[in-house]
Amino acid sequence: MFPSYEATSISAPILQRPPINGHGSELHDKVKRTKILLLGLRRSGKTSIQQVIFNNLSPKQTFYLESTMKIVRHTIDTVIPLEVWDTPGNITIEALGTSLSQFSALVFVIDIRDLYNQPIAKLVEFIVAAYHANPNMTFEVFVHKAEKLQEEDKIENFRQIHERVSDRLFDISSEYEQIQLNFHLTSVYDHSLHAAFSRVLHKLIESLPYLEDMLNIFCANSQSLKAFLYDVNSSLYVATDASPVDSATHNLCCEFLQMLNSFGPLYRSATATSARPNRPLSPATPLSPGSDAHSSMHTGVGSSDVVTYDTANSNASSKPLTYPSAATSLHPSTPGTTLTCHLITSQLALLAILPTNVYEGRRGLVEYNVVVFREGVQDICNAARESRAGG
């Protein structure tokens, strides 16, 4: 007999808190969602990963999360609608209650300090079954809690897990040698987790090539050194330009976006009139269209770290949506670099690194390119949404 698990329709909030950052749409049951299966042994960190990324839970609070006792389905609205299945540590293929062919990605979490035999055996079992059910499924292995070990031990354990999984699959059949497995070293205490889950998301976005082309064109026309298209709520980058991604730049962009999410909504525009409804701004409200903000803030990311957070001045009756932007100087020395953030849709933001002399001397051209980029991305998102609705 196999244990019985009940799959719930939406995730229960931690300590009965309301949903954070707008994840969990009321229309979750009417939208065709891309499903991600989150697996791992008990206390491996599955729920912590989901809560830190999508509910902005502080990493220090993950210690108090209870073990998952039944399947919980989290509906998440980002550039594509997602449904993440958080499973108990002793879940079996039969107890899932659905075919593995329904999932587009399988993410298996292994505690880097754990004894490897049991999690690897479970991982291989699910990989073999999922490969036969859906050969196009992507397989991701998060070697988690990397902060617990020294650098040398961390790399050695990561290598051993990689080799043992590959050897176990090859021992079963040489057919499985062609399965593409992606291994990621992750921790909730740095941005390695966001970088790893971003790469998982990239494989699920059908419109990714078009978004990347738009970013490449923006970088070429604006002399941008690097550009990312971020999901505002989760701090996952859904696309980037063709230049390589280095961890320092990625970490800087994540921290800048999280700072804007935390402090931006606290400020109102100096041009706000009494005719506007006086609605309170919640600190949990992310950077979004229509938020009135105009202020200077210190970010701590550079020696010249004054940030201007502006909302375009426009007539509320003719243009109800506004698109906040922000910029901070990273290096004061000549020529210097500037990190900018422009809201593109209610869920996406463009973060770009520009030479300071280009940003200050040709700001009009840069902002014109942002407008063209915004229109292109919105068209791509609308086409993808219509395709899903029609499918």
Image (cartoon, grey):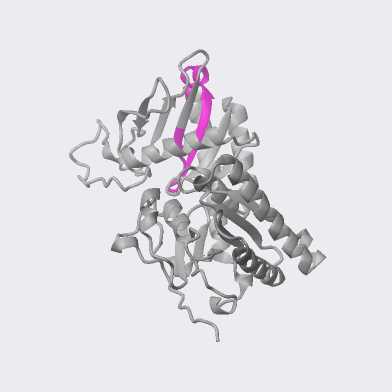
Furthest-left residue in this view = 274
Q: Position of residue 270 (x, y in %)?
A: 24, 30
Residue 147 versus residue 328 in the image, above or below: below
* Magenta stretch, residue numbers: 341-364
- In which quadrant of the rendered view does residue 269 lie? top left
Give the vertical position of 186 relative to 122 (above or below): above
Q: Is the residue 305 above or below the residue 28 in the image?
A: above
Q: Quadrant of the N terminus?
A: bottom right
- Residue located farthest toward the top when viewing the structure as drawn: 334
Quarter of the view holding residue 92: bottom right
Quarter of the C terminus within the rendering: bottom right
Residue 248 placement (x, y as % from top left): 53, 33
Q: Is residue 8 visible?
A: yes
Frontmost residue, 248 versus 223: 248
Q: Is residue 206 left or right of residue 248?
A: right
Side of 215 where 327 appears, left or right: left
Residue 322 in view: no
Q: Residue at x 53, y 73 (%)?
A: 91
In the displayed image of the protein, which residue is found farthest to the right?
A: 174
Residue sitting at x 71%, y 54%: 163
Residue 169 in picture, x, y percent from top left: 74, 64
Residue at point 65% right, 55% down? 161
Task: Please name whichever residue, 153 or 245, is drawn nearer the observer in this view of the structure.
Answer: 153
**Image quarter of residue 255:** top left
Q: Is residue 246 magenta?
A: no
Verify whether residue 360 appears in magenta. Answer: yes
Residue at 54% across, 78% down: 95
Q: Indicate the position of residue 340 as horizontal and vertical percent values.
A: 46, 30
As drawn, the residue found furthest toward the bottom would be: 1
Q: Say which of 65 and 346 sits in front.
A: 65
Residue 225 is left or right of residue 76, and the answer is: right
